[in-house]
Amino acid sequence: QVRLVESGGGLVQAGGSLRLSCAASGSIFSMAVMGWYRQAPGKQREPVAIISSSGSTNYADSVKGRFTISRDNAKNTVYLQMSSLKVEDTAVYYCRIDSGFTSWGQGTQVTVSS
């Protein structure tokens, strides 16, 4: 079982930036698809950004041009750089790993104030 630990959430004003990190245990990280998802109050969890083992990325339309997902296989860590944050980006952000199985992190709260 892979354990995922997110960090970097917090409170930021609209227009500001945050960087989320997700550290994974185990030796399969470099072969796994990694993703960031978010869930706002009263809404379903939705994908934000995905990065493949080769580094290909996909983004939700709502974050394109503002968020960047990246990975450091040497550190077993995936990042989400968030810029130009909007109030509607407020949510709990979850890290997910897919490698023949799926695991989720515990989530980190991001709150964007107006």
Image (spheres, grey):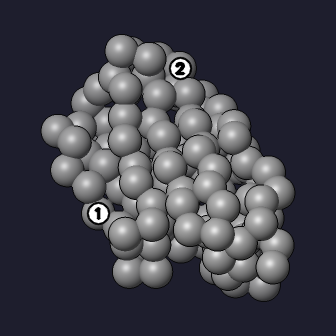
Q: What's the residue at 54%, 60% (across, down)? A: 83
Q: Amino acid at mark 1?
A: Asn
SS for dot 2: loop
Q: Position of residue 27 (x, y in %)?
A: 38, 15
Amino acid type, callout 2: Ser
Instruction: Give the secondary structure at mark 1.
Output: strand
Label 2 sits on residue = 25
Say how many tags the image has. Answer: 2
Image point (82%, 57%), residue name: 11
How far, Cα to Cα, is label 1 from label 2? 24 Å
Kindly indicate the quadrant of the structure image that contains residue 109: bottom right
Percent position of residue 113, x then y: 82, 73
Q: In the rendered image, is residue 48 in sight?
A: yes
Q: Position of residue 114 (x, y in %)?
A: 81, 79
Q: Which residue is mark 1?
A: 58
- Nearer the observer, 44 or 12: 12
- 13 versus 25 height, above or below: below
Q: Earlier in the sequence, mark 1 or mark 2?
A: 2
